[in-house]
Amino acid sequence: MDNIMCNISNSFDSEGADGSDHDKEITNVIFSTKDEVPSEEAQENAELWINDEDSADFDDDLENINIANFFHRVDSDQIIYQKKKRKLKLVGRYVMGDLLGEGSYGKVKEMLDSETLCRRAVKILKQRKLRRIPNGEQNVQREIKLLRKLKHKNVVNLVDELYNHEKQKMYLIMEFCVGSLQGMLESSPDKKFPHCQAHGYFLQLIDGLEYLHSMRVVHKDIKPGNLLLTLEGDLKISDLGVAETFDLFAKDDTCFIGQGSPAFQPPEIANGLEFFPGFKVDIWSSGVTLYNITTGLYPFEGDNIYRLFESIGKGEFTIPDEIGEPLRSLLFGMLEKDPEKRFSLQQVRQHPWCSRRPPKTNVRVPVPPLKGDEWHNMTVLPYLVDHYYEDLGDSLNDAQYFTEHELNEAERHQQAGHSYGNAQQSQSSKRASRWKKPISCISVRGFPGCKQS
């Protein structure tokens, strides 16, 4: 059940006996179907008392009116919604699409390059927001500088940079990815991948790390959330905001600062050492990542960051019995407390688990659907249709109206759809999910006094 209140006052031409401007009749309007929606002419003649300048004394009369005249309980299937028209937005030569995600630094949206027709993703950063984040501006500038020179199939590619100095916004246009390993893990009941699937992702991670280290770059924040996937299934290392580059003449990979995610930090950082070998930090965090995607757990845990770092600093952990050799020995080698004894990238690459692919299975964790769309269709196209072919766009879609009940059902099915192996959606939820985009209740449109309670 959902409550909607819509108070409308109608103005009459006759003057009151006391010479006042107009008599006011307060009515409550509920639209059960789209056929009951008043015409535009009728809406123009209707005047909302909430916006009326003469309503200052109206509160005095409320006590004499039955409150039931104002509040009505209606079923959710009686509230009719209609999709809003999407507004086309251009940034340079790029057409903006829907929101893909949002983080502490800014939003990520889909884009279409109008010249090459390539699908892109844009990271939108506000300088005002970056200034409120410790080292925010420095981290972004460091990432931009690094991405300009990095070109590898397993490192996310920076395509273009745009700046709006008036709005103090930066637009970082990158190659399009459909999701992250973290999102896939969260959609799986066991929070892990089958070993065959994890094996493929891990080898791509090692390829990307080998390239970064060859370019004298330490990532410092390897984790499932920073490992993205393209539509073709290629893994991309992203988020180089805390990465560090060594000078060409530096004698080794010594680092002095660690800024990565706490659960993926090595003992040397957890114990507060003044300096440590940088490349071994990436080995450790990759080991924690491998542990996580194959077991669904973390090797080290704590109620707070202090307990967590205490656990990491000791370097003691267990591996579930279900994990056998040779994966077991690989995890122990990558999560060695002493960085000098910890595996190198070459040792990881040559390890038997990496050189022998686990048996294939028919079970795989899919990339979770984006806003109910399991095919990850381009979200820019509806904006183009609405802009250039408004009439055609309306005729192509038979479901222009739908009820709040259908929306609630679609949302429940969408949440259930994030679970691995979910059942098929019902017909009504499919109909509503097709318009899982900006919408408005048609009983509110033209009547801003209507409020959902």
Image: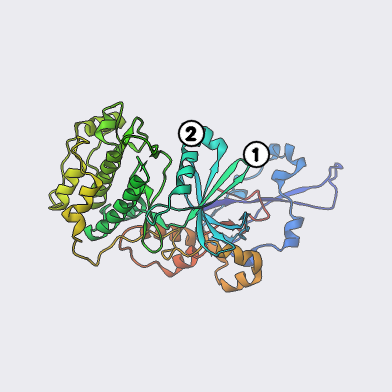
Q: Which one is in front, 190 or 216?
A: 216
Quarter residue 418 falls in: bottom left
* Three-letter amino acid code at the position of disc 2: Ile
Residue 421 appears at what percent x and percent y?
30, 63
Whole-angstrom CA distance, mark 1 to mark 2, is 52 Å
Instruction: Residue 71 in the image: state x and y as whole percent.
Output: 58, 49
The answer to whether residue 304 is visible is no
Q: Which mark is residue 133?
A: 2
Q: Height in image: 304 above or below 12?
A: above
Does any portion of residue 127 appear in the rendered image? yes
Compared to residue 281, the image places residue 30 above or below, namely below
In the picture provided, is 398 more to the left or to the right than 27? left
Q: Which residue is found at the position 29% from the left and 28% from the top?
A: 306
| Residue at image point 22% right, 32% down | 311
Q: Is residue 352 left or right of residue 409?
A: left
Q: Which residue is mark 1?
A: 63
The residue lying at 35 percent from left, 50 percent from top is 211
On the image, the x and y values in percent for residue 244 come to 39, 38
Residue 380 location, x and y as percent? 55, 61
